[in-house]
């Protein structure tokens, strides 16, 4: 990767911060990164990483090679309209806005712009994210490889067709919250049975972490690992029976479906706002 590569962020929320941390833990120095946001509220933590900050989106675009557009979906048309006159063939534009399609991004940017759509998730802030990206019409394999190189310290990075991006939003973007809910419920179950709350939450957190790590490293299907925990007539099968009676499997599948459909709905709304060239 070019040591002179300049990286910019428009938007200073959690996704931008997580990606920036991952990039800095690789081969990109803070002096090669710049972030813009309309207020000072979120810029302080970037400044603590020695990243240059500004309120000017144009300043960021003009100083970078790879630009992450990390704003809310409804703000994407306004932001891209503002910066489009400064986007050249030097730039690779990476959007992390949920639901905003490649077609919409390419419509809002100059013809021939290199666009990549990326969906990260919150654990990027601890370099344990799950990220999926898809390349636009003019983004070649080499541009995808560059993005992978930038993001390799952020966690798991995969490329796939655009149809998978909204699904990934439901599975992993929103799925993080589903896991937190389950961890909370695990701890509350222990509290109900008499364990102190702080201890219960620490153990629940470690249980989720350990289970996930084992699942990732073992390369076994979740059902196989689950069966390895169960013994005939033991505690786990009784607990699993209670979960199935509560509909946990169907509810979880429905949650992913609902979040995916919402991501698609957001994309249609953004597309419906029309071109702002």
Image (cartoon, rainbow, N blue to C red):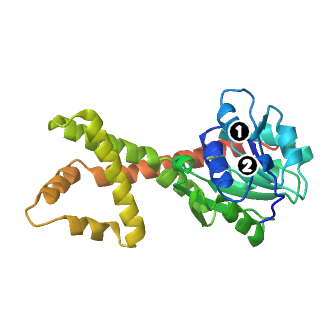
> Which quarter of the rendered picture does the N terminus lie within?
bottom right
Residue located at (36% from left, 42% from top): 181
| Residue 98, position as x, y percentages in the image | 62, 47
Q: Residues within 10 Å of mark 2 (few under 14, many from 20)?
A: many
Left or right: residue 161 versus residue 253 is: right
Point out residue 69 in the picture as x, y percentages from the top left corner: 73, 46
Does residue 76 appear to the left or right of 275 in the view shown? left
- Residue receiving disc 1: 11
Q: Is residue 189 above or below residue 257?
A: above
Mark with earlier residue (2, 1): 1
Q: Which residue is mark 2?
A: 68
Question: Residue 149: x and y, percent?
Answer: 69, 64
Query: Which of the 4 quarters of the picture holds residue 215?
Result: bottom left
Q: Is residue 61 left or right of residue 104?
A: right
Q: Is residue 12 visible?
A: no
Does 121 sit above or below residue 76? below
In space, the residues marked 2 and 1 are separated at their CA atoms by 8 Å
């Amino acid at each position: 990767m070019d040591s002179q590569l300049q990286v910019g962020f428009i938007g200073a929320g959690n996704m931008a911060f997580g990606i920036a941390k991952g990039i800095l833990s690789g081969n990109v120095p803070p002096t090669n990164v710049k972030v813009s946001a309309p207020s000072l509220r979120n810029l302080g933590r970037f400044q603590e990483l020695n990243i240059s900050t500004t309120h000017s989106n144009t300043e960021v675009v003009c100083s970078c090679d790879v630009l992450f557009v990390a704003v809310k979906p409804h703000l994407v048309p306004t932001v891209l309209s503002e910066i489009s006159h400064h986007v050249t063939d030097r730039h690779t534009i990476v959007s992390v806005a949920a639901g905003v399609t490649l077609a919409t991004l390419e419509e809002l940017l100059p013809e021939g712009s290199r666009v990549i759509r990326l969906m990260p998730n919150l654990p990027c802030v601890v370099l344990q994210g799950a990220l999926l990206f898809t390349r636009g019409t003019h983004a070649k394999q080499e541009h995808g490889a560059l993005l992978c190189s930038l993001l390799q310290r952020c966690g798991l990075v995969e490329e796939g067709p655009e149809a998978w991006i909204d699904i990934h939003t439901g599975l992993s973007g929103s799925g993080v919250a589903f896991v937190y809910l389950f961890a909370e419920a695990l701890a509350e179950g222990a509290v109900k049975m008499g364990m102190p709350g702080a201890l219960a939450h620490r153990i629940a957190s470690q249980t989720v972490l350990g289970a996930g790590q084992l699942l990732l490293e073992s390369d076994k299907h979740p059902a196989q690992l689950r069966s390895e925990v169960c013994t005939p007539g033991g505690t786990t099968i009784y607990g699993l029976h209670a979960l199935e009676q509560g509909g946990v499997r169907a509810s979880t599948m429905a949650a992913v479906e609902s979040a995916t459909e919402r991501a698609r709905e957001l994309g249609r709304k953004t597309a419906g706002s029309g071109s702002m060239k």
